[in-house]
Amino acid sequence: MKYIYFFSPGSVEGSATMYSTLGNKGAHLAEMSLLGLPVPPGFTISTELYGSFVSSKSVPVDLDLKGAMERLSNITGKSFGQPNNPLVVSVRSGAAVSMPGMMDTILNLGINDEIVASIAKHNEELAYDMYRRFIHTYAVTVLCVDSLMFEDKIAMKISEFNLSAPRELSVNVNKELINDFQGILQGCGVSIPDNPMQQLEDAIVAVLNSWNSERAQIYRKMNNIPEYVGTAVNVQSMVFGNLNNNSATGVVFSRNPTNGSNTMFGEYMLKAQGEDIVSGTCTPQNISDFKRISLDQYNKLLEYANILERHYRDVQDIEFTIEDGKLWILQTRRAKRSIYASIVNVVDFVNEGVISENEAITRVLPNELIDLLHPVVDYSENIKLLAKGLPASTGAVSGQVVFSPAQAMEMTSQGKKVILVRNDTSPEDIEGMSVSEGIVTVRGGMTSHAAVVARGMGVPCICGAGDISISHDLTYFTVMSNNIVIKKGEYITIDGSNGNILLDRVETTTIQEFPEFEIFKRWVEKHQSVRVQVNADTAEDMCNAFRNFYADGVGLCRTEHMFFNKDRINVVRCMIISDSRASRERMLEQIYLMQVNDFIDIFRNAGARIVTIRLLDPPLHEFLSEESQVVQKVASTLEISEEEVLHRVRMNKEHNPMLGLRGVRLGIVLPEIYDMQIKAMMFASSQFPGTVVHIMVPFISNVEEILIMVNRIKLIARDYPDVKYKIGTMIEIPAAVLLTDQIVQYVDFISFGTNDLTQMTLGISRDDSSKFIPEYMSKGLYVQDPFITIVDSVKKMIDISVTKARSVNPEIKIGVCGEHAGDVRSVEFFMTRGVDYLSCSTYKIPMVKLAVAQYTIAHAKQKV
C-alpha cells in the first residue's frame, strides 16, 4: 500500500482533489507545488496509515520512513540527522476537513546537541532559539510533560530581563533555559532521543494520536466532522523566519476576513517563526507596513495570494515565511471569515464572473447568518472605555469576566453569561471558549488562535489588548493606563467591530443592513420551494419578520402569549378561577374585546399572507400565582376573600400539567374559552375582506376531539357568512400520529409540533432534559440535543404521519412549527418529506430560507 506522497519542484504525487487521502493541508501543498509556487519540499503520509495505526496501535512496518527522508535529503541538498548542513523538518497533522490548531505540530525536528553545536558555528542565535523551541514542543507533544513547567521558566526569564516575548531571549538565556528544560525532563524520567529518525517516528505517532485529543473531539462535535476520518501527517523541510534580520514570517488573507474588502489582509513579524503569530504569544505588525521594509517581497506575496484565490475561486488563508530574503508559501486553505465578509465575498465573486448565483448561495453556511444579527454597541449612551485591542471577530456582547476555561464552564453551568479574558488562548481552551459569549486576549493579533477560532464560532473577540494585566491567581485584571481593576464576576462589554473594551453592561443595537446582504437575500428568495413562516405572537413581531426577514406568513401565533399582557393578566386570572360559567363568561367578554383588537392588528399587518392562529394551549395554572399582590388584586376584582382565591388557585394545580388539562381539552371541558377566541378571530377577519383565517387546534389525541372542534368552529362561523377560514390541527401526540389518516378527513392542514412530539416519543421532559442530555451526548447516546435537532425515532413518527395523511388526502397541507423547524440540520429531513411550510422564530428565518434554497439547488442538480 502506498503511504507516502511527495511534493517538491518537478516531483508532485498529489493534488487538491486528493484531500481524503492527503488531508486538507497535504492536498493543498501538492496543489501549490503543481502551480509552481515556492513550497518547501516534503511528503505527506496518507490518511490510509491512520486506519492501520488505529487497528494495530502501531505504525505499519512497510512505512519506508528512512527511504523517504533520504529522498527528501537529496531533494533539499541537506542531510537529515547529520551535523553538516542538517535537514530540519516540521511534522504537522492534516485532516481532510481543516481543523486549525486542534491537532499537534512539532517544529524544528531533527536536531540534538551535536547538530545544534554545528549550526551555532554559523548562526548561534538561530541554533539555540530553535533548540529551546524544539525541546519545549517535543516534551509537551510527544513526551506529555506539563507545558506549564516550561512556560514558568520562560516567564521568569522574560520578567527578569524585561522582555515582551520568548523570541527576544538572548543566546545565553536560551542556553540557560535549555539546561533548565533538560533538567525538567530528567526530573520527569523522560528524555528526547538523540537519534533524529527516532524523534521523527515518535512525532508521527504523537500527531496521529492527537486526532483523539479532547480538544480535537470537541471541535469535531462542534463542527459535525465525522470521527472515523482520521488525519494525514505532513513532513516538510523547515525554512526559518528567525534566521536573520532579512527573514520574517506571517499570515495573510487574500481579502479582508472581517469586512470582505478586496485588499490583502494579514500580519507579519520580522525574525520570528510562524508559531509566534499563530499562538498569539506575540503581537505582530500589519502586513501593509511590510511595504516599507520590502516592496518587492510584498508585491510577490500579493501576486501569490491572487494566484491562489483565482485558482481556488475563493478567499485564501496563507502562511508564509521569508528566509534570508526568499519568500516561501507554507500553507493555503479556505479562509475562515465573518459572515459579513462571506456575503460580501460571494456577491463580489458573482459580479467578477468567478462563480454563479447558485454557487454563491451554496457557499454560505446557514448557521452563520445568525452572526449578522449580532448586536452592536449603542455609543449614544454614556459609556466608559476601559481598554482597546484589535477587532478580531465582530459583534458586541456583555458578560461577567472569567480568566480560565474552568471558570467559564463553572459559571455558564449556573446560567451566567461570561467573557473569557486570557493572556492568549491555546487549543486546550476550546471548551471554555465555546461556552463564552466573548473572548479577550492580552496578546496576539488578528490571525492568532483566539481570533481564528472566535470567527469560526461567530463569537465576538478582541485580541492584543496590551493595556490589560491579568493577576497571577486569575482573579482580576488591571488596566495599566488608568489603574482600573476588574474582578472575576464583574461585567464588561466588548465590541468586536472596533476593539473597544467597555466598563459594565452597555446597551446594544442591531447591525444595519448592507447592500450585499439584500442582494444575497433576493438570490435566496428565487429558490424557496416551501414557505418559511414565522412563529410570532404580536403584530409588532410579525411586522419585523415580514419587513426585515422576508417571512412568508405566520405559521404559529400563540394566543396564550397575548394573555400575559400586564393590562389583561388579572382579568385572565379571574376568568380561570371563576366558580361558575356565568362568572367566567363575564370575564371572557372583557378578554374578547382584547382579542378582537389583537387579531385586527395581526390581520391588518399580514395583508395577503397566511396567518395561522393556535387556540389556547398551555395548562391554565401557568397564568396563576400565589404572590400576595396578585392574590389581593384577584380577590378585589371577584369580591371574594384572599383565602378563597388561594384555595381556587391550588385547586387548579396538576401533578403533571403538561399531560393534563391543556390544548383541545380546554375547548371541550371549558368550551366558552375557545368559543370566545373563535368569535374574536371571525369578527376580526370580517373586517378584512379576502382574509382567510387559519385556525389550529392543539394537542389532539383522538378523532372525536377534532370532530367536536370542527363542528364547533363551523357553528360559530354561521354568524360570519362572508369570512373564509381553514381548520387545522397539530400532530404532537403519538396517538395523533397513528390516527393521522382519520384526522385529515376533517381538517385542511396539519402541523407537526415537534417539541411535544419529541417529548412524548422519547419520554423526556424538555424542562428537565438539561440534567442528563449533556451526559447522554458525551456517551454517544445522542449525537445532538433531541430538542434542537430531530432524532431518528421522531423522524419515524413524522414519516408514519405524512404517509398516512397523503394516502387519504394527497393535497393536504403539511407544516412544522416546533423548534426543529428552525434547525438547519433538520431542514433537509423535512424537505425530503415534502412539507409545505416551516415556521420558526424570527431570527432563524434567514438561516432556514438559505437551507431551503441550498436543498432546492442540490435537488435540482440531482434531477438533471
Image (tube, grey):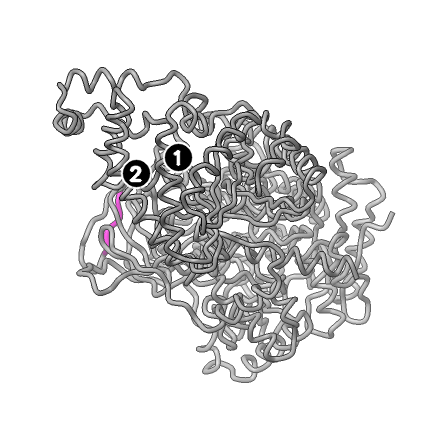
Q: Where is residue 184 shown, x and y percent of the image?
A: 49, 38
Q: Nearer the viewer, residue 460 or 27?
A: 460
Q: Is residue 646 left or right of residue 753?
A: left
Among the two numbered marks 1 and 2 on one chain, the one whose residue lies closer to the N terminus: 2
Q: Is residue 810 left or right of residue 431?
A: right
Q: What residue lies at 29% left-to-right and 24% top-to-bottom?
A: 581
Q: Nearer the viewer, residue 575 or 361?
A: 575
Q: Where is residue 38 shown, x and y percent of the image?
A: 68, 72
Identify which amino acid the numbered label 1 is placed on.
Leu
Q: Are marks 1 and 2 in contact (CB under 8 Å)?
A: yes
Q: Where is residue 687 shown, x and y percent of the image?
A: 37, 55
Q: Is residue 30 left or right of residue 394?
A: right
10 Å crowding of disc 1: few (<14), some (14-19), many (20+): many
Q: What is the number of callouts on the image? A: 2
> In the figure, residue 376 lies in which quadrant?
bottom left
User: Where 490 falls versus 764 (above or below)?
Assistant: below
Q: Quadrant of the C terminus?
A: bottom right
10 Å crowding of disc 2: few (<14), some (14-19), many (20+): many
Rounded to the nearest angstrom, the CA distance separating label 1 from label 2 is 10 Å
Q: Tell me where the magenta segment starts and ends, as one range.
A: 473-479
> In the figure, residue 689 lies in which quadrant?
bottom left
User: Where 307 falls versus 65 (above or below)?
Assistant: below
Q: Nearer the viewer, residue 250 or 547?
A: 547
Q: What residue lies at 74% left-to-right and 33% top-to-bottom?
A: 57
Secondary structure under the numbered disc 1 in the rendered image: loop
Q: What residue lies at 41% left-to-right and 63% top-to-bottom?
A: 547
**Residue with the mark numbered 1:** 616
Instruction: Determine if residue 140 is in view.
Output: no
Q: Identify the disc placed on residue 563.
A: 2
Identify which amino acid the numbered label 2 is placed on.
Phe
Q: Nearer the viewer, residue 344 or 279?
A: 344
